[in-house]
Amino acid sequence: IVAVCGTVVHVFDLKRTENNSCNATTHYALAYEDVLIRSATLIGSLSVDDGSAIETKLALLLDTGRLYFISLTIDEEGNLEDHGESYIEIGAGVSFPTAGIRRYCGGDPVPKGS
């Protein structure tokens, strides 16, 4: 299970549940708190050449207009390979056209046509 919050992504490995509770096993945090994750999506699952693992990509669109990809790999036993905390550098990734998308700066929404 992948939970995307404003500045962090939590990945839960359901195979590591204990006492009917599942804690996040992997965290991907943005290196700077003034940048937010605008949107995220999982992109397919691909079997690795030897069939021993499955890899999927998590695409994150940051409010800076950068598109960042995270590889999530599940081994042959069904366990998530990455554990712990990793930081996402906001300059990494590719530029994504965000024309017409405005960065939220708090306050009331701007009326249409202004």
Image (cartoon, rainbow, N blue to C red):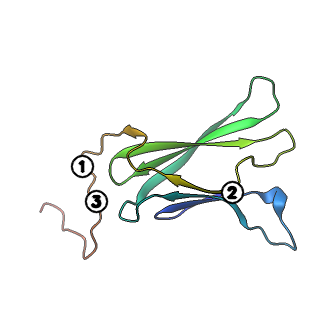
**Circle 1 crowding by C-alpha within 10 Å: few under 14, some 14–19, many from 20:** few
Label 3 sits on a secondary structure element that is loop
Residue 4 in which image quadrant: bottom right
**Circle 3 crowding by C-alpha within 10 Å: few under 14, some 14–19, many from 20:** some
The relative height of residue 46 versus residue 103 in the rendered view (above or below) is above
Q: Image quadrant for the C terminus?
A: bottom left
Going by the numbered disc 1, the residue's amino acid type is Gly
The number of callouts visible is 3
The relative height of residue 106 versus residue 86 in the rendered view (above or below) is below
Q: CA distance from mark 1 to mark 3?
A: 10 Å
Write the residue at 44% across / 57% down. Answer: 37
Q: CA distance from mark 1 to mark 2?
A: 31 Å
Label 1 sits on a secondary structure element that is loop
Disc sitting over residue 100 in the figure: 1
Left or right: residue 42 compared with residue 113: right
Residue 78 in which image quadrant: top right
Q: Indicate the position of residue 89 as horizontal and vertical percent values.
A: 44, 50
Q: What residue is disc 3 on?
A: 103
Q: What residue is disc 2 on?
A: 1
Write the residue at 81% across / 28% down. Answer: 51
Q: CA distance from mark 3 to mark 2?
A: 28 Å
Q: Indicate the position of residue 35 as horizontal and vertical percent values.
A: 37, 60
Mark 1 vs mark 3: in front: 3
